[in-house]
Each structure stands twice: as C-alpha cells, then as structure tokens.
Amino acid sequence: MGPCFRRHDGEGVGAFVGLNVETARRALAARLKSAAIDSSELDARMLLGATLGLDLTGMITAAGRTLTESEAAKLESFARRRLAGEPVARILGQKEFWGLPLKLSAATLVPRPDTETVVEFALDIVRADGALRKPLRIADLGTGTGAILLALLSELPSATGIGTDISTDALQTARDNALALGLGERATFIACDYASGLTDRFDLIVSNPPYIPSADIADLAIEVREHDPLAALDGGDDGLNTYRALIPQAAGLLAPGGALVVESGIGQSGAIEALMTAAGLVSAGPPRADLAGIPRAVAGRKMPR
C-alpha cells in the first residue's frame, strides 16, 4: 500500500503532511480565517516562515517544495496553539518593536505598536531641545522586555539608561535583549517597584504601566488576558492606580527641564495630565495619538530652575 496521508482540513496532526510550502500556507491561512482570526494571512506566513527558517523571499522560492514530516508536525503544533488563542509572538518567542527584534518571556508583555507612540513623543521632545546627541540619562519604569528603553537608546547614541521592573525574570529578558542588540554597555536593569529604587536624576523618564480597569480584564482578547502577565495589565478600579504612585516618584527624579512620557489607556489622558500637574509638572504638549486616533502618550516636564 502506498503512503496514506491524513485529511488536509485541519483534522489530526498530519494536516500538512504531503503539502508543498505554498499549499500549506494557504491551508493554514484558511484554518485561521475560519476561526475568525483577522490576521490569518500574516499569521500563516509568520508561522510557516518560523517552521521552515525562511523569510518571505525564501518561502516564495521554495513554494513548490514538499514539507518534511517534521516540518508538517511543527506547523501543526503552531497552528493548534494559534487556534487556541496564543498570539504569534508568544509562539515564536519574540516580537519586533521599533524595528528591533525583542525576545519575550512569560513575565513580559508583548510589545505593541501603540507603545511606539511613547517613543515618538519622547524623541520629539529631545529633538526640540536639540539634545539628540547629548549624554542623556533615561529611566524606563516597568521595563518588561526593555522595549521603550532600547528603542530610545537605539536612536540616541550618547544616552544611557536604567530599566526597572519588579520581576527578575522580566529584567533578565530585558538584559538579554540589550546584549543581543549591542546596547548592553549603555543599559542597566534594576529590580524595584517602578522608581522606588532609584535616586539619580534623569533627563527623560518613560513608562508603559498597567492601565486596564480591573473589571475590564475579563473582556480583553484571549491573546491578552490569557497570555500577558496580569500584573502588567491590571490598573485597579479605574486603571489609574499605578499612575498615582509612578508620576510623583518620577517627578521627584527628573532633572530640571526633564520630561516624563507615559502610555495612556483609552479615555485616561485627561486624568493623567491632571496627576502630572498635581506633581508639579507642566504639559509638554497635547497627548499624542496612536494610529487609531486614540490619545496614547502623555508628557509632562519639570520646569528649569
């Protein structure tokens, strides 16, 4: 009897056995689409590429090659994890942010494009001050993967920075990312609750704190609520608990003329601005909107003496 392949409709571990690269990509995209995953085409390309160790050009070149049994099994494993709600970044163990590949861990959020708004706002402030090449001191409070800090260091060649996090696992992930990006000599990581362990003065402080109201956690997408760490999401009853602690801490650590830039949840920018004002900071400009038009980054400055 000749080889007997399983059905290609997603049933069983052999769904991709006997398929070539292009057919496997289409089959995976169809399975993801049938599960109402909006990013089905992109997810299929990324998962297949990771399975084969190929970029998009490589997959096009290899379109007619038949998957090996081990490749088919690996792709099936990836497919089942994605269909169960695990985000692609978690499956692959890394996520690109600001053009930088960042390793993830269970203790870190998956960096999101919205957070790049914080980086953009911070760089605009530095640029307006004519300080792009000055030896700035940066602090990233609740650094997670190190995403915001490392993005800023990649753009500010004379800057150094400190990332803080209460999770030692997150800090190790951030250290690994800094080393992998060649930024290890300019980045230091400290275990503490936001700014509680810092005493230096900083020219720029940034943060993406937890800001989801506790009652809203259950309504988040499965990719977030079941795979991102709860401590990095839950901002208390109104989502602002961390800002109430973080903003006064940060204001006390800013050098004269220094800036604090934080990420904001939907509808929170006005309350965050009020907290900055109460801490003695002045507005650094209107809140910066993300690509969806949502005010996403809020900035305040410490007045020069």
Image (spheres, grey):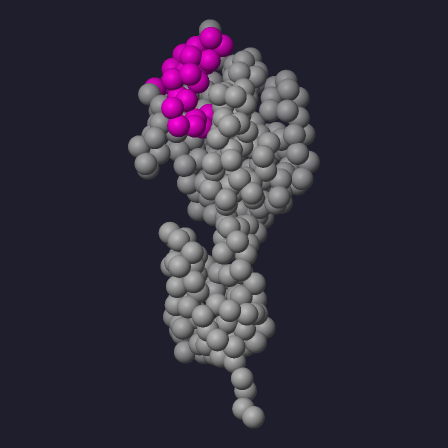
Q: Tell me: 56 left or right of 196.
A: left
Residue 35 placed where, x, y %?
42, 56
Q: Is residue 287 visible?
A: yes
Q: Tell me: 216 left or right of 183.
A: left
Choose between 157 and 48: the one closer to the eye: 48
The structure residue drawn at horizontal position 40% and vertical position 72%, both measured from the top left corner, is 22
Residue 36 placed where, x, y %?
39, 53
Q: Residue furthest left?
A: 293
Tally of numbered discs? 0
> Is 304 placed above or below 237 here?
above
Residue 80 placed where, x, y %?
53, 60
> Is 151 placed above or below 134 here?
below
Q: Residue furthest top?
A: 305
The structure residue drawn at horizontal position 43% and vertical position 59%, both measured from the top left corner, is 32
- Quarter in which the N terminus is drawn: bottom right
Q: Is residue 132 visible?
A: no
Choose between 201 and 230: the one closer to the eye: 230
The structure residue drawn at horizontal position 62% and vertical position 40%, both measured from the top left corner, is 107
Q: Quadrant of residue 229?
A: top right
- Please tell me whether residue 268 belongs to the stretch shown in magenta: yes
Choose between 180 and 3: the one closer to the eye: 3
> Is 281 placed above or below 3 here?
above
- Please tell me whether residue 207 belongs to the stretch shown in magenta: no
- Bounds of the magenta segment: 262-285
